[in-house]
Image (cartoon, rainbow, N blue to C red):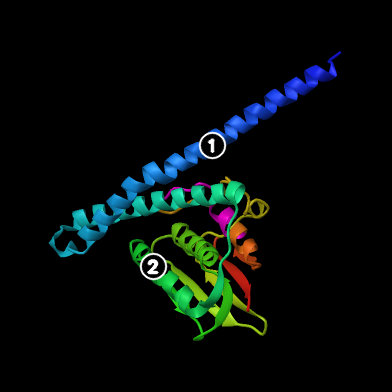
């Protein structure tokens, strides 16, 4: 028969082990976010400089440069998701509400991703009314729409199209991100926003995935009081509809 004192000692030892493992996990993420992110940023800057003078490169060299760009962007995106995961789980997210022109905001996000989309011959179409203003947090909105647009590119095959639109509703603004990717299977839907989940759909150009992208999107969206619904058809594509209160 186990004595109460022995049970207490065992529980304390287990708690100590759990705390130690959590500390090591946070330390690993910290190392990744600082020591690995810095050289990747330097490589990214060099790639951008080389792309400014692409006319002097051969077709093969341009192709290699495009692949380098994709790999670096992919690596930085993975690090960003890990840092977001740490902040969500352990540090929390501080909100700084401000007036945001959501039409111009989404337009800027689309423009940021056009270079990456061009490398897969993917066209991003954007439509929106002018000057729709909401009160929200810039950081949270950035992580939501960076995640959705980058995922649409990552899981779309070469030559496909992505459609991003903003619609003005009576009490809210809806932002749609629609792709022509493979869609989600029924078994994927229940774990779509869970962390570290590998779904049946795979990136189409060898991009990496931490299984954190949609988890991060959902957490940041919840933080600002937004909602999201998904319309998906296997083999056809998926539309994410984000609703934001005015």
> How many C-alpha atoms fall within 10 Å of the one at disc 1: few (<14), some, or many (≥20)?
few
Name the residue at 37% across, 43% down.
36
Residue at the image position 60 percent from the left and 46 percent from the top = 90
Q: Which of 176 and 160 is in front in this view?
A: 176
Q: Is mark 1 on a helix, strand or loop?
A: helix
Rendered position, 169 above or below 52: below
Query: Residue 112: which numbered mark, if any?
Result: 2
* Residue 200 image point, x, y percent: 56, 49
Viewer-closest of 75 and 138: 138
Quick check: is 240 in the magenta stretch?
no
Query: Element under label 2?
Result: helix
Image coordinates for residue 131, horizontal then vertical, percent:
51, 85
Assess whether mark 1 and mark 2 are in contact (beta carbons under 8 angstroms).
no
Residue 112's spot in the image, x, y percent?
39, 67
Q: Mark 1 points at which residue?
A: 25
Left or right: residue 34 compared with residue 193: left
Residue occupying image coordinates x 30% and y 54%: 44
Vertical comparison of 8 with 186: above or below = above
In the rendered image, which quarter is residue 219 located in? bottom right
**Which portion, as a residue range, is magenta?**
207-218
Quarter of the figure with the N terminus: top right
Split into 4 quadrants, where in the image is the C terminus?
bottom right
- Residue 175 place in picture, x, y as percent: 56, 74
The answer to which quarter of the image holds residue 22 is top right
């Amino acid at each position: 028969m186990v004595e109460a004192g022995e049970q207490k000692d065992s529980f304390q030892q287990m708690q100590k082990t759990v705390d130690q493992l959590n500390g090591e996990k946070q330390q690993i993420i910290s190392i990744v976010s600082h020591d690995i992110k810095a050289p990747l940023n330097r490589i990214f800057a060099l790639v951008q400089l080389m792309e400014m003078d692409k006319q002097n490169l051969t077709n093969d060299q341009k192709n290699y440069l495009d692949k380098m760009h994709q790999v670096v962007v992919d690596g930085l995106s993975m690090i960003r998701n890990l840092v977001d995961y740490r902040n969500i789980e352990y540090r929390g997210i501080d909100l700084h509400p401000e007036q945001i022109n959501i039409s111009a905001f989404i337009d800027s996000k689309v423009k940021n991703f056009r270079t990456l989309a061009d490398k897969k011959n993917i066209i991003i179409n954007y439509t929106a009314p002018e000057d729709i203003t909401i009160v929200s947090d810039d950081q949270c909105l950035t992580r939501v729409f960076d995640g959705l647009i980058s995922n649409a590119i990552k899981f779309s095959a070469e030559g496909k199209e992505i459609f991003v639109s903003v619609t003005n509703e009576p009490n809210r603004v809806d932002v749609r991100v629609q792709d022509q990717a493979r869609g989600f299977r029924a078994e994927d839907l229940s774990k779509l926003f869970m962390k570290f989940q590998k779904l049946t759909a795979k990136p189409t150009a060898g991009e990496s995935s931490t299984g954190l992208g949609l988890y991060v999107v959902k957490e940041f969206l919840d933080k600002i009081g937004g909602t999201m619904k998904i319309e998906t058809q296997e083999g056809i594509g998926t539309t994410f509809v984000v609703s934001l209160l005015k």
